[in-house]
Image (spheres, rainbow, N blue to C red):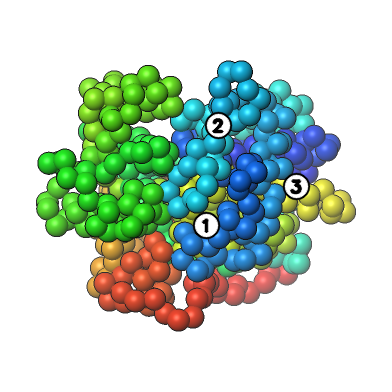
Amino acid sequence: MNRQFDVLILGSGTAGQSLALRLADRGQRVALVTKRSLADSASAWAQGGIAAVLDSTDSIEAHIQDTFTAGAGLCDERATRFVVEHGKAAIDWLIARGVPFTREDESTVGYHLTREGGHSHRRIIHAADATGAAVQATLTDQVLAHEGIEIFENHIAVDLVLGDKVGRPGEGCLGAYVLDIDRDHVATFSARNTVLATGGAGKVYLYTTNPDVATGDGIAMAWRAGCRVANMEFIQFHPTCLYHPHAKSFLISEAVRGEGGVLRLPDGTRFMPEHDPRAELAPRDVVARAIDLEMKKRGLDCVHLDISHKPADWLRGHFPNIHARCLELGIDITRQPIPVVPAAHYTCGGIVVDLAARTDVGHLYAVGESACTGLHGANRLASNSLLECLVFGEAAARDILAQPGRALPALPAWDESRVTDADEEVVITHNWAELRRAMWDYVGIVRTNKRLRRAQHRIRLLEREIHEFYSHFRISNDLIELRNLVATADLIVRCALRRRESRGLHHSRDYPDLLPRVRDTVLRPPKRPQQS
């Protein structure tokens, strides 16, 4: 089956859905492809909020400076200014769409702004402690109702279709092969423009705050298509993931520390002031390393985040979801500290794009966590992620709408004539577990060259085994994700080995100091011969 659209968007988080609405509102026929349901994305899990300059006491320059400071000198100045300057417009667009941000109080028209680690001002607009869910729910209702958007749930992209590979050199990306998971059938999606909004790669690690769909699909597909990938060594570990055997990937928002939460050892001792003068309000990389050090030094399974000194009614009002979830697990945050551990949270690097979200391949864009815009540098400032999704989603829409139309050729169907049904699916499960354990053990918060080489050796073995499996058996959702995870893990390790310093989220025992010259780590895929 060959489906044709003006724009094919792979991924249904805030970046993908906001872009779909902007395009469909202007008459574009949009296909929105998502691996599970529209609600399954990292965006929907975002608790804290969206950073933007919305208060008269704040300024564009202050937000830029805070972003630079968190990014450890690696943020791109043009990209950072571009995002921050468009922040208020992005928030206004969401408000116009009906997102129910929290008011200062019931009698005012103003919105409550909170503060998070690394910010010098209160500039985080939020919807209680479930901002991502509120944004996602609002956009999803409108996406579902829009006649110009066709939704494909339980579909996963296998690979991009490039003109050079189908006898149309120079035409860039022409769409993608997409597996219908329910029907076990690969369809061909043709599109004048294709957008990767597939999110990050947190599932490459054993412990993560990310949903199960965060398997680096867009980054891996773009790399195979010939796009540059940059700064993959900078994996942000969120300092405070709830530590409980029944609390899979539940994040304790940055805003808990922003509102006065204190990190303590099991005996009640506060430790963050010994690690940084900003204490609990230090950027995430500093806090995560401090927790990691205290846990390893003392043999702890976790530390504790205590906000029980705040009034109970205030806590239930500001953090209703965190309060309710913890209470389900027997933790009353109004009286008890919350057990927490660091966990892989955000992929700061990704596919290299310009200020219009364009990749190195024509008619192929990347937005959201899958892209490397230059905003985050060596460490993402809290609540800049949803802002980036919205601003670059709008930039991509503007660029796509300005393009002249182009005719789409009939693309060849997916060829399964030389493969058979898999005989041992357990191989996929075992390889997945081995990869995630190796990445957690050797490519975590603190790294050494020896650990990185060990990880690289295991990745190489897994790559060969997965390639053999992929070449001989019919594809499945699990196989596609594993193939992409291994490719993404390889990119993370290759970038980490190239950076011979400790900067931001990349902390190396072999290279503990900063280099005087600030440089991005840019990987270029090997050139492939064109087909004619």
Mark 2 or 3, which is nearer the eye? Answer: 2
Q: Circle 1 sits in a helix, a strand or a loop, which is it?
A: helix
Tally the marks: 3
In the rendered structure, the answer to whether residue 34 lies left or right of residue 502 reads: right
Q: Position of residue 266 (x, y in %)?
A: 15, 41
Q: Residues within 10 Å of mark 2 (few under 14, many from 20)?
A: some
**SS at mark 3?**
helix
Q: On residue 66, which mark appears? A: 1
Mark 3 neighbour class, 10 Å CA radius: few under 14, some 14 to 19, many 20 or more:
many
| Residue at x 76%, y 67% (from the top left corner) | 170
Residue furthest front in the image: 57
| Quadrant of res 324 | top left
Graded by Cα atoms within 10 Å as few (under 14), some (14 to 19) or many (20 or more), the crowding at tag 1 reads some
Labels 2 and 3 touching (C-beta < 8 A): no
- Give the number of the disc on residue 112: 2
Of the residues shown, which amino acid type is indicated by label 2?
His
Among numbered discs 1 and 2, the one appearing first in the sequence: 1
* Label 2 SS: loop
- Mark 3 or mark 1, earlier in chain: 1
Position in image of residue 82 (x %, y %): 68, 57
Q: Which residue is mark 3?
A: 397
Can the viewer see residue 116? yes
> Label 3 sits on what residue type?
Ala
* Residue lying furthest bottom: 516
